[in-house]
Each structure stands twice: as C-alpha cells, then as structure tokens.
Image: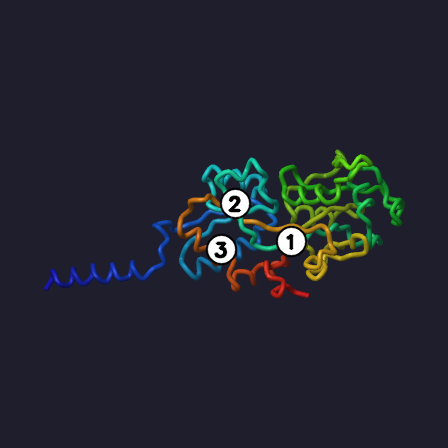
Amino acid sequence: MKFLRIKNIVLVFILVLISLPSFAGKNHITIAGSTTIMPVSEKWAKAYKKKTGIVVNVHGGGSTSGIKATQTGTADIGASSRELNYSEKDHLKQIIIGKDALAVIVNKSNQIKDLNIDQVRGIFSGRIKKWNEVGGPDKPIQIINRESGSGTRDLFTEVIMHIMLADKTNKVVPMCLSSIVNNSNAEVKESVKLIPNSVGYISIGYVDNTVKPLTINSISPTPKNVYDGKYSLVRNLYYLFKEENDKSVQSFLAYVLSKEGQLFVTKEGFLPIVENNARD
C-alpha cells in the first residue's frame, strides 16, 4: 500500500509538470535598458507574474546599457528606445513593442506655446540664448538635456539637430555644453517643473500637468498626428534578445505583443503597435 501511495504521488507530480507551460527550467527573466520603457515593462512584469508565476526583474540604465547587458547575458531582454546599429545587431534580434513620441516641454509659467524646428535647434545648440528671441520673456534659457547613450537623446539629435547643407550633406549641430544633463525622463520633467526658464524633452508617456508641452511647427504629439506622420519626433520602442533564448523569454515576448499586453502600452501613455488600439 505504501508503495502504491508513493507511485501515485510520483504519477501526479509528473502529470502536473506536463500540464505546466514549458519554460525550460527558467523561473525568472531579467530586463534592462531604456528608462523610457521601464514603466510599461514593470506593468508587464507584474501582470505576467500573476499569470505564470515567472518573476520578471526590471532594471534601467539606458538603451545602450540594455543592449550591452543583453549581448553579455547579464539581461535576458534589453529595452531600447532606439534601433540597434550595425555593430550591435550581431546575434541579437529586436521586436517593436510600441511607439513613442517626444514632447518638448517648458515650465508651466512660460508663455511660449509653439516653436518651429529651427527654433528648437537654435535653443539646444546655444545659438538662441533668451526666451525673448522666440517670443517669450527677456529671460535666459536653461537647457535640460539627456545623457549620452540615451535613446531619447539619440532621437532628438536625429530629428532636431541634423541639418542638410547646400551640398546635400548632413551635419549634426552640437548640443550646448552649458545644459544640465539628467539621466531619465522623470528627472528631466522634475527639472523643468522646478526651473522657471528651462526647456527639455521627454517621452509623451511622462507628460502630465506639472509641465507644459509645446507644439512643434503648430503640431501636437497626439496619437492621430503620430500615426498620420504629421509629427516628426516619433520613434519605435524595442525589446531585444539573443537569437537563442529560453522558452520563458519567448512566452513573455508573446504576452507583450498580445492584445492584453498592448493595453498596458496605451495605459502608460505610449502608442500600441496597432493604430486601432490607440487613444484619440
């Protein structure tokens, strides 16, 4: 009888194992990288743990750090708010997990509502030094910038700081050296909130009523304008991973791209992959 009980227990245990999802023995996943993507990554991690019991640890550090962590195996998934460059693509794959737009923001006390791209470039290069040069008060402009290696800064540089010369070659206008450098969207928002004459740029997912987003060329970063291609400060958000990865990583990525997973993108103020799921 004792032998039969043990046999039955073993049989039940085997049946339980068979019925569980195949995660190849891995019971946790590590994500590292873009601070822009962190809030939605944390929401996915919480929901996925509730569904599967798999723990997903989320860390920041910036897009470049996340890419390097994935290359070295420190992270299972890298979060990046920029596309992989040629040298980073070796042995890594990337998927689009959502879309984002950047908003140029000022302090709520600032009367400026709209800037054109040339004015934004002039401000961040240091060529325009006072707000009265663009229709504002006679006050010096304090620039709040992102750190080198940030995907947010890379997009801003690509769209705003690039100019085409008369000979059809591209030139990158350098950023002003006297800017205050912050390491996350949240820090930039807080700096602009506290410094009356400041200007910065953040993901639209971080914009709230503590700061004032500007229109660029009279166009606001609404979902409709982003999907219609009218607003230029737009980027894809990526997860990246090694070509050979654990089944638990594959399952998590499938959840992120599912209809339920994409709802978290919208809730965090970003734009889902499918336009029909976006907020107006």
Q: Nearer the viewer, residue 56 or 218?
A: 218
Which x, y percent locates residue 79? 55, 47
Locate the C terminus and report the quarter of the image it occupies. Answer: bottom right
**Camera-side residue of 1 and 230:** 230
Q: Earlier in the sequence, mark 1 or mark 3?
A: 3
Q: What residue is shown with label 1?
A: 100
**Residue at point 71% right, 41% down?**
157
Amino acid type of the residue that numbered disc 1 sits on in the rendered structure: Asp
Q: Alpha carbon of mark 1 to alpha carbon of mark 3: how far?
A: 20 Å
Q: Which amino acid type is shown beneath numbered disc 2?
A: Gly
Residue at 10% from the left image edge and 64% from the top image edge:
1
Q: Residue furthest left?
A: 1
- The quadrant holding residue 162 is top right
Mark 3: amino acid: Ala
Q: Could you tell me how far apart the alpha carbons at marks 2 and 1 are, in whole angstroms? A: 17 Å
Q: Is residue 122 above or below residue 223?
A: above
The mark lying in front, picked from 3 and 2, is 2
Q: Earlier in the sequence, mark 2 or mark 1?
A: 2
**Mark 2 = which residue?**
78
Considering the numbered disc 3 on the image, is that residue within a helix, a strand or a loop? Answer: helix
